[in-house]
Image (spheres, rainbow, N blue to C red):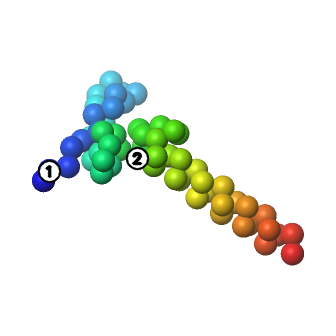
Amino acid sequence: MVQSKCGAPTQSGGRCQNKAMTGTSRCSKHQGAWSPYGVEQRKKKEAEAKMKKLRKKR
């Protein structure tokens, strides 16, 4: 099975040539903040920041 390309419009006027993420039509760069991938990444980053803050308090 061939993985599709993202195809999102770029600033230069062309189309994104990155491979689309599994189960979506866009790459990780063009998913957007509220896609399942974006939400997962944001939660991961927030959890790491929280742990860093807790370690700093000690």
User: Element at badge 2?
Assistant: helix
Give the residue type at disc 2.
Ser
**In the image, residue 12 above or below residue 3:** above
Residue 20 in the image, given as x and y percentages of width and height: 29, 45
Residue 19 location (% of width, % of height): 27, 47
**Residue 45, located in which quarter of the rendered image?**
bottom right
**Residue 2's mark?**
1
Which residue is painted at 40% across and 27% down in the image?
Answer: 11
- Which residue is located at x 66 percent, y 60 percent? 47
| Residue lying at the far bottom of the rendered structure | 58
Is the C terminus in the top left, top right, bottom left or bottom right quadrant?
bottom right
Residue picked out by circle 2: 28
Q: The residue under label 1 is which amino acid type?
A: Val
Where in the figure is residue 3, as x and y percent of width and height?
20, 49
- At mark 1, the secondary structure is loop
Residue 49's tag is none
- Report the residue that reaches farthest toward the right: 58
